[in-house]
Image: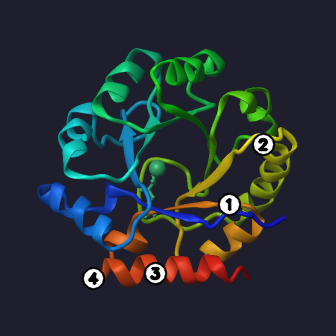
Amino acid sequence: MAALKTPLIAPSVLSADFSRMADEVAAVENAGADWLHLDVMDGHFVPNLSMGPQLIKALRPKSKLPFDVHLMIAPVDPYIEAFAKAGADHIHLHVEAGPHTHRSLQHVRDHGVKPGIAICPATPPEAVGEVLDLVDMILVMTVNPGFGGQKFLTSQLRKIETLRRMADATGRDIRIGVDGGITAQTAPLAVAAGADVLIAGTSVYGQDDYAAAISNLRIGAHNPA
Ligand code: DX5
Ligand code: ZN
C-alpha cells in the first residue's frame, strides 16, 4: 500500500562536515530539506559515538527546520529531558533500547516533543504494536544502526508494508520514516512500501550539489517503482 502523503526529505548530518556543522545545516535548509535528522550514538547500544545534546543545542538557533533526533542510546530515559531542552522537535528511541519503551515514549510526549519508535532490521514489526497509540512516527532502520554509508536492506520492505497497515489501522496519523541506504534508487521502493519520510545521509551530504541530491530523492519518491 502506498503512502498517501508527500514524502518528506530529512538529511542526516552524520555524513556532514562536522568542522562546519552550522554551514552544513544551513546548506540543506537552503537546498530544500524538510527536516534535519540528528543521529545520537552512545558506543554501547550501537558500536559508534556521534553527538550529544550540546551540539544540537548549539545548532538550534541556526535553523528553522524541525529537528528529528534519533537516539541510538541505552538507557534512554536519563537523557530525554536534555534532548528536549536542546530543541528536539521529534525524538525517536529504539524499541530494542530497554524494557520500558512505553514509559519512555510518554516521557518524550510529556516534554512537548513528538515521539517516534525506531526498529532495527532484526526486530519483527509486531514488537512496536503495543506502542503505536503513543507515537507520531515509526523509524524503520533499513541498515543496522551505527554508521552511514551502508547498503539498503531490501529485506525490510515487507516490514515497512506491514507497519504501514498496522499504522493505518490505528486511525491515527503516523508517519513511517526509513533510515539507512536511502538513494534515488531505493527511495521509490521504500515509498511504494508505505514510507513517507526519507532520511538520507550519504546521498545528500556525500554529493557536491545538495539541492540536486534532495530533488533527485523527491523525484524518485514521487514516481514509486
Ligand atoms: C545510521 C543512522 C542514519 C545514517 C544514514 O545508524 O541512523 O541516520 O546517517 O546514513 P546513510 O544515508 O548514509 O545510510
Ligand atoms: Zn538515523
**Mark 3 near ligand 1 (CB under 8 Å)?**
no
Tell me the quadrant of ligand 1.
bottom left
Q: Amino acid at mark 3?
A: Ser
Residue picked out by circle 4: 208
Element class at badge 2: helix
Whether residues under marks 2 and 3 lie with C-beta atoms below 8 angstroms apart, the answer is: no
Sequence-wise first label, 4 or 3: 4
Mark 3 surroundings: few (<14), some (14-19) or many (≥20) residues within 10 A: some
**How many angstroms separate mark 2 from mark 1 (CA)?**
14 Å
Element class at badge 1: loop
Using the rendered view, name the quadrant where residue 61 is placed.
top left
**How many angstroms separate mark 4 from mark 3 (CA)?**
13 Å
Using the rendered view, name the quadrant where residue 71 is placed.
top left
Tell me: residue 106, above or below residue 58: above
Tell me: residue 204, above or below residue 162: below
Position of the N terminus, as image quadrant, is bottom right
Residue picked out by circle 1: 195
Residue picked out by circle 2: 125
**How many angstroms separate mark 1 from mark 4 (CA)?**
26 Å
Sequence-wise first label, 2 or 3: 2
Whether residues under marks 1 and 4 lie with C-beta atoms below 8 angstroms apart, the answer is: no
Q: Amino acid at mark 2?
A: Pro
**In-image side of 223 versus 28 (left or right):** right
